[in-house]
Image: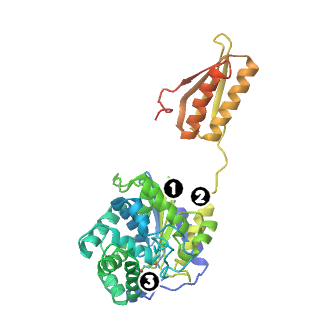
Amino acid sequence: MSRAFATVINQVRAQGLHGRVADYIPELAKADPDEFAIAATSVSGHTYQAGDSASRFTIQSISKAFTYALALQACGIDTVLRHVGVEPSGEAFNAISFDDRHRPANPLINAGAVVTTSLIPAATGDERFERIRAGLSEFAGRQLEADETVAASESATGDRNRALAMLARSHGMLGSTVDDAVEPYFRQCALLVDCSDLAVMGATLANHGENPITGQQVVSPTIAQQVLSLMSSCGMYDRSGQWLFEVGMPAKSGVGGGIVAVAPGEYGIGVYSPPLDEAGNSSRGVVALRTLAQEFGLHLFNHPDRPTSPIAGMVNDHSADTITLHLRGTIDFIAAEQVAYAAAEALHEAGRSMLLLDLADVTAITTVAGRLISDLCEDAGTARAWRVIVRDPARIMTS
Ligand code: GLU
């Protein structure tokens, strides 16, 4: 993987892409525009990286996805949904975007992010920031610290975010005072990460909310799924639709130049390159992830060719009046369907009355496939004159 990342870095560098380092927060303008890094962490906890992977940068908007996860965990989905929606806004990150129920459109634009931060239970802004810092550190598997100079620089110039918070408060959507929402928000955006921190944070979402390095269950599998859904529809500012269309991975970018992307069930990817395109996404980061998604087939709706048949072998035993099917690998709906039809045909052709399904070499059965196989057993007894016996030494059907 590291070699593939180094190749992508070289290829993308050679394209001489243009972009501007964010400067509306004055401290961000100091970032080195040449820095470029890619890292990935698998759900088994291995990390692969290339480029300037030791460089640290502020997490900025990427924090929004993870703070949303913490808010869901602390307050529950119903409370959070009363305050902030889940619709892509199609508008810029700092737009005045409220729906007909006065909620910000989603938690990944600033209006929704400030509201989400305000929902984290705490008596003061400092306590709120500390809870967020601790929670994001659990996602990263190490203690994150804020760059207080960047936070102060944003606070000094952050009137638009204050205005969004005031509007949200006037609509009854803010969970705290304006200051106790925006100050922790500025500091959460200023948390310092490197590319592999982003990769681990993404891998925690990829791994059903369990950090694959520390083994800690940071949020529930349901919350991880909810956050990934939002990242798919709203994570890349007002290019989210184009991103889903072209790249097809849940992702979240920040104006610091970072992007976190997730291959669910497999790995998290962190990319860092400070120059931004006109939507505010890292120019090189977007192209690097698009290239990786194409090369590795990571688009959510790209389904690989089906593996070889789930039937490893068939034995027709005349003396026992039995057909045995040895199954292998992962049995999903289509594989179970293949088994059911192959079994019916074989029993019919051979005139046998007993089917033995041997699951000794099966590694997993999806829920729907398990249902289909159970139905097959039941139907066999009633509608047809066969008996089905399942040999399941590892109890894969019941696990
Ligand atoms: N702290 C930044 C802001 O609210 C985050 C923006 C971003 O990364 O999109 O303006």
Q: Disc 1 to disc 2, how far (Cα)? A: 9 Å
Which percent across, then down, holds residue 115?
39, 73
Judging by the rendered image, the residue that carries numbered circle 1 is 264
Residue 390 x %, y %: 55, 24
| Marks 2 and 3, the one that precedes in the sequence | 3
Q: Is residue 69 above or below residue 351?
A: below
Please name whichever residue, 327 or 241, is drawn nearer the observer in this view of the structure. 241
Q: Residues within 10 Å of mark 2 (few under 14, many from 20)?
A: some
Q: Earlier in the sequence, mark 1 or mark 3?
A: 3
Crowding around mark 3 (Cα neighbors within 10 Å: few <14, some 14 to 19, many 20+) is few
Mark 3, residue position: 32
Name the residue located 33 percent from the left edge and 61 percent from the top edge: 74
Label whose residue precedes the other's in the sequence (1 or 2): 1
- Element type at marker 1? loop
User: Percent from the top left, x then y, of residue 381?
Assistant: 62, 20
**Contact, mark 1 vs mark 2 (Cβ under 8 Å):** yes
Q: CA distance from mark 2 to mark 3?
A: 33 Å
The residue carrying mark 2 is 300
Mark 1–mark 3 distance (CA, rounded to whole Å):
31 Å
**Quadrant of the picture in which ligand 1 is shown:** bottom left
SS under mark 3: loop
Query: Which amino acid, by three-letter code, is at mark 2?
Result: Leu
Can you see residue 196?
no
Picture layout, residue 42 above or below residue 13: above
**Corner quadrant of residue 196:** bottom left
Looking at the rendered structure, the number of numbered marks drawn on it comes to: 3
Q: How is the image coloured?
A: rainbow
